[in-house]
Image (cartoon, coloured by chain):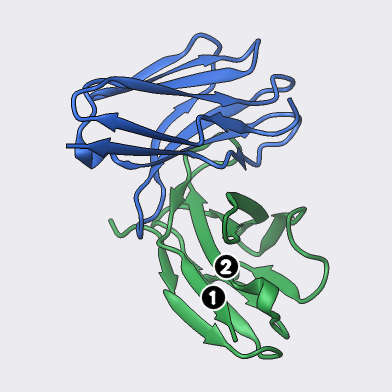
């Protein structure tokens, strides 16, 4: 049973470009969470999605960031017009059940904005 | 307590020492407390999920306790080994939200 997959593992973008980060949850998991780890900080929640629905996006910046989890395919975190401050490690986690269910993390995507 | 706080921030011990660290979290409307082990260049690995006051969980030499009334959890490692070196994260779902809030972690280094 493959774990949570994220790609790419490393992504370099110039300021103003778009970044697309992908997350495939564990088989049988329909709940996906995105977290961001800025340098010298802990994991910060960004958004929680179920298939085709955004459940909680209270941690998402209001502009330039969006997320989706379509019926088919991976969850996508999209950052438009990236700025240097977006450089961080982005982690995705999935769980089988909502709420207090155990979350399984992917290896993360390290985004560098030059 | 409004945030999840972990102490100490870092810890150096010798192989064979037993050690413990603390996670403090909001005690109101508590749902769950998670502990993760995070090795450098890897993804966080779930250790325990605890939901009931007084819960104690154990996995090998690692154990954890939970006090939801006062809002703290302890993680214990008995007879530390160099391979235990990692950052130990706790995350609390409480304060009216199922979404876990993470602490900054305790970085453990076990010297041979």
Q: Residues within 10 Å of mark 2 (few under 14, many from 20)?
A: some
User: Residue B103: where, in percent of width, then height?
Assistant: 58, 38
Look at mark 2 in the image and give the residue it sits on: A88
User: In the figure, the green chain has which letter?
Assistant: A
Quarter where residue B17 is shown: top left
Whether residue A73 is visible, yes or no, is: no
Do circles 2 and 1 both sit on a common chain? yes
Pick the residue in front: A13 or A64. Answer: A13
Residue drawn at the location 44% of the way across and 77% of the way down: A10
Instruction: Establish if A108 lies above or below B39.
Output: below
The chain to which mark 2 is attached is A
Look at mark 1 in the image and give the residue it sits on: A111
Whether residue A13 is visible, yes or no, is: yes
User: Residue B13: where, in percent of width, then height?
Assistant: 30, 30
User: Residue A17: where, in percent of width, then height?
Assistant: 66, 90
Residue drawn at the location 54% of the way across and 64% of the way down: A90
Pick the residue in front: B48 or A29. Answer: B48
| Chain B: drawing colour | blue
């Amino acid at each position: 049973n493959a774990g949570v997959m994220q790609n790419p593992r490393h992504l370099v973008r110039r300021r103003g470009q778009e970044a697309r980060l992908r997350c495939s949850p564990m088989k049988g998991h329909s709940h996906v969470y995105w977290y961001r780890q800025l340098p010298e900080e802990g994991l910060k929640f960004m958004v929680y999605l179920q298939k085709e629905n955004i459940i909680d996006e209270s941690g998402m910046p209001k502009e330039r960031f969006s997320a989706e989890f379509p019926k088919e395919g991976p969850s996508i975190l999209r950052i438009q017009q990236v700025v240097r401050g977006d450089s961080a490690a982005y982690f995705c986690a999935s769980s089988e059940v909502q709420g207090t269910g155990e979350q399984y993390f992917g290896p993360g995507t390290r985004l560098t904005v030059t | 307590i409004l945030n999840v706080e972990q102490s100490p921030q870092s810890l150096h011990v010798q192989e064979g020492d037993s050690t413990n660290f603390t996670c403090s979290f909001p005690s109101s409307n508590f749902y769950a407390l998670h502990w993760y082990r995070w090795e450098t260049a890897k993804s966080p690995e779930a250790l325990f999920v605890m939901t009931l006051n007084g819960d104690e969980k154990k996995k090998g030499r690692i154990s954890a306790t939970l006090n939801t009334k006062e809002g703290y959890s302890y993680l214990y490692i008995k007879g530390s080994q160099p391979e235990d070196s990692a950052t130990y994260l706790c995350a609390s779902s409480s304060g009216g939200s199922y979404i876990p809030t993470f602490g900054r972690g305790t970085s453990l280094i076990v010297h041979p």
